Amino acid sequence: VAMIYPLLIKNGNKLKNHLIKNKIFIATYWPGISGLVDIISTEMHLVTNLVCIPIDQRYDEKDMERIKNLILSYE
């Protein structure tokens, strides 16, 4: 079973920060890669714009609705 829903969007870092400020845990995978690859590489694009939405057993329907609403209301 998946632990996250991988949402790849433009300016994903801004959405990550918005969710984190609203007390939603958002994992960042491969954070140490920035010094190892070109800034315009596919790898940096993923680190910067991939928002890993949590969907594991700790979250119930109410939690998922809240996360959905935070994403949809984000500017």
Image: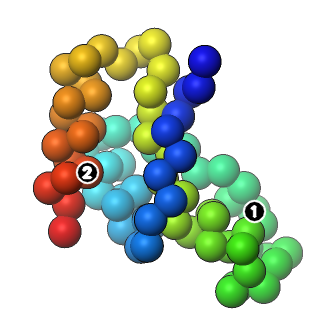
> Which mark, residue 70?
none
Q: Is residue 59 in sight in this rendering?
A: yes
Instruction: Specify few, some or many for label 1: CA neighbours under 10 Å numbering under 14, 14-19, or 20 or more.
Output: few
Give the percent coordinates (x, y) of residue 42: 72, 74
Indicate left or right for 57 with 38 as reference: left
Q: Which residue is at 14% across, 55% downward?
A: 73
Q: Amino acid at mark 2?
A: Ile
Query: What quarter of the picture does the N terminus occupy?
Result: top right
Indicate left or right for 72 with 27 as reference: left
Q: Is residue 21 in sight in this rendering?
A: no
Q: Which residue is at 29% across, 57% downward?
A: 18
Applied colour scheme = rainbow
Q: Which residue is at 53% across, 46% downward?
A: 6
Instruction: Specify few, some or many for label 2: CA neighbours under 10 Å numbering under 14, 14-19, or 20 or more.
Output: some
Observer-nearest of 63 and 23: 63
Q: Quadrant of residue 60?
A: top left
Give the percent coordinates (x, y) of residue 3: 56, 27
Question: Vertical placement of 16 versus 43: above or below?
Answer: above
> Which mark, residue 71?
2
Question: Vertical placement of 5 versus 63: above or below?
Answer: below
Q: Amino acid at mark 1?
A: Gly
Residue at numbered disc 1: 32
